[in-house]
């Protein structure tokens, strides 16, 4: 049972007979009258248990998109139901409106539409629906919570796909769609052409030169069917929010853009999300299936508040491929102490693979170093400089061990990682 504001107001009116008749008995008489009216109103209210509920939900939705959830109410009782309906979506689903007023005559059906704009990935669930059925006067209500399970899957938004067309154009240039050709080791032979001043003498084909009796050089194109292994750290450091976005979400955006680019370039992409156990894995997929499986694997994963087990990563990469590959490690390197595990296993990876460490940095840290107007800002600037020095120390250690580093803000990191992949292709290192 639930009371309404009308009942409270009606009880408060009891002060009027007390003032008029100057007799406390008048108040008791008024309260008795209100109680009788309220009970009669409650008895005339339709039973919320006599309502059949059916939920219709949309399919998977990208983070930040607006969708509609429809709830159908069928009044199987004999009384008209005047009710307030609340669908039990969590706050992260941003259900609008949160409550609906409905008027359902006996043996009729009504639809309640709730707009959802989720701001967190994963499965957003509504386990129950609460009905508060009022009587004709709206004083008291019968209330029931009915289990009506439902859920929607919220996928990563992949907002970085806006950078894909420009990067694909650069890949086409490397692949020979334009006049640009790449020369050097580690690329596939494309054709022969006459030598021009400035060409690398190591590109001269001496046999073809002997046949033509003129200097001839080989031209090359980037190799295809290379392996790209993306390992995303889902440990505690990936839970930190930068620019109101968790680190792991930025890592997912970077992985999606890199996977889309590498797949178009003819390379094979594998994804592993790991902390101390494999939280998600995508292997053997290509083309559109690759991105579909990646967003499906990423959607339900949230960071675990545990340390990343870096000692297991070399074996994890070996289980994915025995070939030489580009291994991308999406993690945090802004704290030297937390990066010791990464630095310890890096030599095992760099001996066999090209290793690229991707890390998001907080742009507000750089902004703090520029503000030194008072004592407080000076202390903050010093803290910012200390953080940048720690990042530089870890980056230098990674490069010294044979790896490479890509850093950037949440908006800049995905295209920066894609650019580094293209640079490796252009240099013949992949």
Image (cartoon, grey):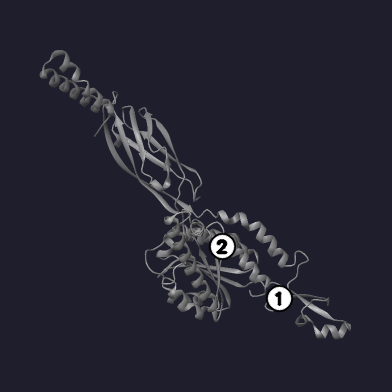
Label 1 sits on a secondary structure element that is strand
- Front residue (pair 332, 29): 332
Q: Which residue is mark 1?
A: 188
How far separated are the C-alphas under marks 2 and 1? 25 Å
Q: Quadrant location of residue 48? A: top left
Query: Mark 2 or mark 1, which has the lower sequence index?
Result: 1
Residue 301 visible in the snapshot: no
Q: Residue at x 13, y 17 (%)?
A: 26
Badge 1 crowding class, 10 Å Cα cut-off, few under 14, some 14 to 19, many 20 or more, is some
Tell me which corner region of the image, top left, top right, bottom left or bottom right, holds residue 79: top left
Q: Is residue 412 above or below residue 207?
A: above
Secondary structure beneath dot 2 equals helix
Q: Is residue 5 above or below residue 369?
A: above
Residue 177 coordinates in the image, percent (x, y): 75, 64
Q: Does residue 274 show up?
A: yes
Figure check: 244 above or below 430:
above
Q: Which residue is mark 2?
A: 290
From the top left corner, tell me how far across and down residue 115 is, in percent.
46, 40
- In percent of width and height, residue 282 lies at 51, 66
Q: Residue furthest front?
A: 374
């Amino acid at each position: 049972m639930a009371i309404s504001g009308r009942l409270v107001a009606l009880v408060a009116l009891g002060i009027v007979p007390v003032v008029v008749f100057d007799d406390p008995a008048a108040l008791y008489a008024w309260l008795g009258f209100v109680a009788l009216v309220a009970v009669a109103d409650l008895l005339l209210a339709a039973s919320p248990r006599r309502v059949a509920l059916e939920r219709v939900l949309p399919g998977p939705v990208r983070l930040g998109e607006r969708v509609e959830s429809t709830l159908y109410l069928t009044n199987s009782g004999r009384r008209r139901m005047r009710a307030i309906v609340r669908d039990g979506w969590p706050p992260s689903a941003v259900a609008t409106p949160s409550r609906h007023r409905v008027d359902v005559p006996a043996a009729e059906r009504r639809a309640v539409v709730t707009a959802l704009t989720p701001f967190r990935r994963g499965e957003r669930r509504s386990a129950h629906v609460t009905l508060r059925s009022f009587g004709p006067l709206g004083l008291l209500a019968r209330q029931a919570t009915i289990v009506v399970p439902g859920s929607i899957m919220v996928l990563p938004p992949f907002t970085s796909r806006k950078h894909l067309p420009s990067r694909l154009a650069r890949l086409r240039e490397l692949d020979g769609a334009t006049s640009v050709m790449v020369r050097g080791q580690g690329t596939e032979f494309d054709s022969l052409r006459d030598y021009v001043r400035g060409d690398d003498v190591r590109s001269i084909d001496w046999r073809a030169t002997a046949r033509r009796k003129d200097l001839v050089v080989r031209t090359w194109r980037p190799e295809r069917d290379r392996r790209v292994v993306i390992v995303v750290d889902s440990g505690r450091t990936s839970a930190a929010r930068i620019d109101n976005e968790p680190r792991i979400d930025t890592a997912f955006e970077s992985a999606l853009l890199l996977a889309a680019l590498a797949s178009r370039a003819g390379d094979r992409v594998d994804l592993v999300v790991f902390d101390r156990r494999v939280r998600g894995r995508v292997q053997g997929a290509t083309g559109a299936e690759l991105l579909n499986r990646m967003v499906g694997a990423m959607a339900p994963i949230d960071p675990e508040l545990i340390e990343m087990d870096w000692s297991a990563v070399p074996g994890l990469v070996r289980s994915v491929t025995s070939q030489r590959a580009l291994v991308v490690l999406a993690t945090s390197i802004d704290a030297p102490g937390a990066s010791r595990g990464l630095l310890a296993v890096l030599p095992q990876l760099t001996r066999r693979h090209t290793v690229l460490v991707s890390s998001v940095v907080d742009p507000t840290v750089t902004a703090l170093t520029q503000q030194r107007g008072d004592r407080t800002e000076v202390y903050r600037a010093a803290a910012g400089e200390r953080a940048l020095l720690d990042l530089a120390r870890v980056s230098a250690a990674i490069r010294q061990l044979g790896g490479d580093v890509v850093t950037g803000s949440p908006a800049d990191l995905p295209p920066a990682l894609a650019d580094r992949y293209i640079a490796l292709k252009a240099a013949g290192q992949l």
